[in-house]
Image (spheres, rainbow, N blue to C red):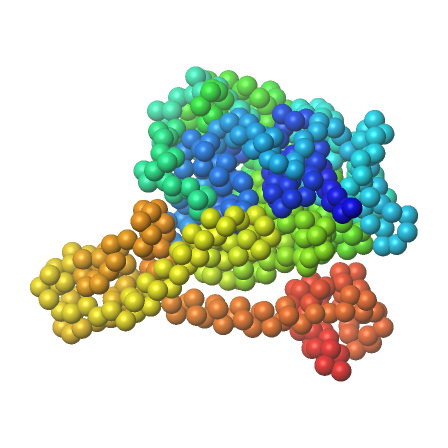
């Protein structure tokens, strides 16, 4: 009789949801454990999905067969494409979520997925075999009950040994007053992992009726909504959108903070953890950017069925009395009523350098980590790691080779590589500047980059894959046609070019040459195109996606070719595998620092070794010579 493959996911946040769904959808008998089932896919901080670089991650999760994109497409209350004044490499989709509906819909998706069981229970211990290689054997709950599993993914978020701080007050709980995880940190420490203490925070929530929006700038959503999921038809999700608003702090706000900075746990010494660099508290902003006269504050709705508003930009851990005073200095918030106070939260996380690029622990087969427990911040970073860990836990159980997404293939690959190879000493946030090949890693082509992986892993169904193959084929065929098509000089074509402020043509020009003009695009030249097909697939939103790809690939052809060449060089380094048992300490031609770093990190290939801090190009050359010998 075939042995039943079973996996556990510890934690029901955004990483846990994607990990559990990836396992269950590939046929693995999966149990997701959460301390509180009402906290599944909760949004304890920003009520939004996406944003700069984060939108790329959501698109990639969807391309692999994940759920986050589909979930936000059904529960958003406002959607905007960011950075449209810049190039397509940094376009990023961001949507305000109805946070309650988002959580409920994700929970229901988990509840109705075959092979997936959800249990409200706290896991205290991860059990491993007594004999090497010490494989995972199961988990033990707070009541001492043992569940046998062949693989475990830890997605504990910000709950491990968590405590919330507000002024001089410390509450030992997870985000939003939910129970913290007690004991799991000690178990992970006993298993040989290094732990770190990180800190994040959240602003207050205020009552809509107490806000004067006339003193603020309205921030409406986009008229034409672009979905996160490649399977979502924009017309099917059209709905009235709820606006956000923009206001600013002022000198009075800053003065109150400076006068009370000694009461902030961050500056009084109460906070032990390292805070996030790219989402600082308001008191941190005032100290670090003392020359700034004002800071932006965005007022964001938390849902359609609540009057609570999220005050983005005013995250703080100052005492409640000071919070009310400083919030009321902001234009439009003079009479604001705080419904939930702001606070900082500290929690335990691991040093992700102890993981493989697959997010599996190097020393314990079958044990994976994903999300904020790896030192990252953000729902999207968590989801990206969650689906990667889920896919790899499934592949591990099925005896197949792990999926490693390369830096040239996806932001998820950049994220995993940065955490595992470089490590982090502060909460890690994804940004477009972290990706060397960002023109190749656009959000619009995430399916072209990653859907093959999702299909191979068993997360993309045959119907979706067939449609994807047709789309890819049409893009290639149409790009080839456009590069061969000649636009002849004529009065009609002259008028089309003049209409868009472009110079006329005295002789025949290839359509691709005209598209490369900054002021023109594939869509603008439709009337001048003598053989353009009316439809590619008969599906409007897929036709639009094909047109977008053709336009981008032609317009940025030179830059794309250059990055492809760079990526090919990068891949050569990644293909040079290093022996897992190499004794770096005995390689005398390596510098001492390199020996120590390489021996501790145990990189999987030359490319990864070259990105370890403290390993120089000369050290890499030594390794290359050794490998040739």
The reply to whether residue 351 is in sight is no
Image quadrant in which you'd find residue 182: top right
Q: Residue furthest left?
A: 491
Q: Is residue 490 above or below residue 69?
A: below
Closer-to-camera residue (413/33):
33
**Left or right of 243 on screen, residue 398:** right
Q: Is residue 389 above or below residue 236?
A: below
**Left or right of 475 on screen, residue 588:** right
The reply to whether residue 107 is in sight is yes
Q: Residue furthest front?
A: 1
Closer-to-camera residue (455/317):
455
Q: Residue at x 70, y 52 (%)?
A: 398
Q: Residue furthest right?
A: 130
**Left or right of 305 on screen, residue 373:** right
Q: Position of residue 294 (x, y in %)?
A: 46, 37
Q: Residue furthest bottom?
A: 629
Closer-to-camera residue (48/363):
363
Q: Position of residue 30 (x, y in %)?
A: 69, 39
Q: Position of residue 7 (x, y in %)?
A: 72, 42
Closer-to-camera residue (403/610):
403
Q: Quarter holding the C terminus?
A: bottom right
Q: Is residue 161 above or below residue 586?
A: above
**Left or right of 93 on screen, residue 624:** right
Q: Residue at x 80, y 64 (%)?
A: 599
Query: How many numbered marks are there?
Result: 0
Q: Position of residue 120 (x, y in %)?
A: 71, 27
Image quadrant in which you'd find residue 516: bottom left
Q: Residue at x 50, y 62 (%)?
A: 437
Q: Residue at x 21, y 70 (%)?
A: 486
């Amino acid at each position: 009789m075939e042995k039943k493959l079973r996996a556990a996911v510890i934690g029901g946040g955004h990483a846990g949801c994607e990990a559990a769904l990836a396992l269950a959808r590939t046929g693995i008998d999966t149990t997701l454990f959460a301390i509180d089932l009402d906290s599944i896919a909760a949004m304890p901080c920003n009520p939004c999905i996406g944003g700069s670089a984060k939108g790329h991650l959501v698109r990639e999760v969807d391309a692999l067969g994940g759920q986050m994109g589909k979930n936000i497409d059904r529960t958003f209350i406002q959607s905007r494409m960011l950075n449209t004044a810049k190039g397509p490499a940094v376009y990023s989709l961001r949507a305000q979520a109805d946070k309650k509906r988002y959580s409920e819909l994700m929970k229901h998706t988990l509840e109705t997925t075959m092979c997936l069981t959800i249990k409200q229970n706290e896991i205290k211990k991860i059990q491993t075999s007594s004999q090497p290689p010490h494989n995972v054997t199961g988990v033990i709950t707070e009541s001492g009950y043992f569940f046998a599993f062949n693989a475990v993914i830890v997605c504990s978020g910000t709950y491990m040994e968590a405590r919330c701080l507000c002024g001089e007050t410390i509450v030992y709980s997870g985000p939003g007053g939910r129970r913290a995880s007690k004991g799991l940190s000690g178990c992970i420490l006993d298993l040989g992992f290094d732990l770190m203490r990180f800190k994040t925070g959240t602003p207050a929530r205020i009552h809509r009726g107490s806000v004067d929006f006339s003193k603020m700038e309205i921030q409406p959503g986009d008229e034409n909504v672009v979905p996160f999921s490649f399977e979502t038809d924009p017309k099917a999700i059209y709905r009235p959108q709820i606006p956000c608003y923009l206001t600013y702090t002022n000198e009075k706000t800053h003065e109150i903070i400076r006068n009370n900075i000694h009461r902030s746990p961050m500056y009084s010494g109460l906070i032990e953890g390292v805070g996030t660099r790219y989402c600082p508290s308001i008191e941190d902003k005032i100290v670090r950017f003392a020359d700034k006269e004002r800071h932006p504050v965005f007022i964001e709705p938390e849902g359609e069925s609540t009057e609570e508003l999220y005050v983005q930009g005013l995250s703080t851990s100052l005492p409640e009395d000071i919070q009310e005073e400083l919030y009321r200095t902001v234009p439009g918030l003079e009479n604001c009523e705080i419904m939930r106070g702001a606070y900082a939260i500290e929690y335990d996380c691991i040093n992700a350098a102890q993981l493989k690029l697959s997010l599996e622990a190097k020393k314990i087969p079958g044990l994976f980590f994903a999300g904020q427990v790896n030192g990252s911040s953000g729902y999207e970073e968590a989801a990206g790691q969650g689906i990667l860990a889920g896919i790899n836990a499934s592949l591990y159980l099925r005896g197949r080779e792990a999926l490693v997404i390369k830096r040239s293939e996806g932001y998820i690959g950049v994220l995993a590589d940065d955490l595992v190879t470089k490590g982090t000493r502060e909460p890690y946030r994804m940004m477009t500047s972290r990706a060397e090949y960002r023109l190749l890693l656009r959000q619009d082509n995430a399916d072209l980059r990653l859907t093959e992986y999702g299909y191979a892993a068993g997360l993309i169904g045959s119907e979706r894959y067939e449609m994807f193959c047709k789309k890819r084929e049409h893009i290639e065929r149409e790009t080839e046609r456009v590069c061969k098509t000649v636009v002849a000089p004529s009065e009609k074509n002259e008028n089309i070019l003049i209409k868009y402020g472009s110079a006329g043509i005295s002789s025949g020009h290839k359509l691709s040459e005209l598209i490369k003009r900054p002021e023109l695009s594939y869509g603008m030249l439709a009337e001048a195109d003598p053989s353009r097909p009316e439809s590619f697939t008969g599906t409007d939103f897929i036709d639009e996606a094909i047109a977008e790809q053709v336009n981008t690939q032609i317009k940025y052809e030179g830059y794309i070719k250059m990055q492809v060449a760079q990526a090919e060089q990068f891949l050569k380094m990644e293909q040079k595998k290093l022996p897992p048992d190499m004794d770096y300490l005995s390689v005398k031609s390596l510098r001492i620092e390199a020996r120590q770093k390489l021996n501790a990190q145990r990189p999987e290939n030359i490319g990864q070794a070259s990105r370890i801090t403290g390993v120089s190009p000369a050290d890499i050359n030594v390794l290359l010579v050794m490998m040739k010998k």
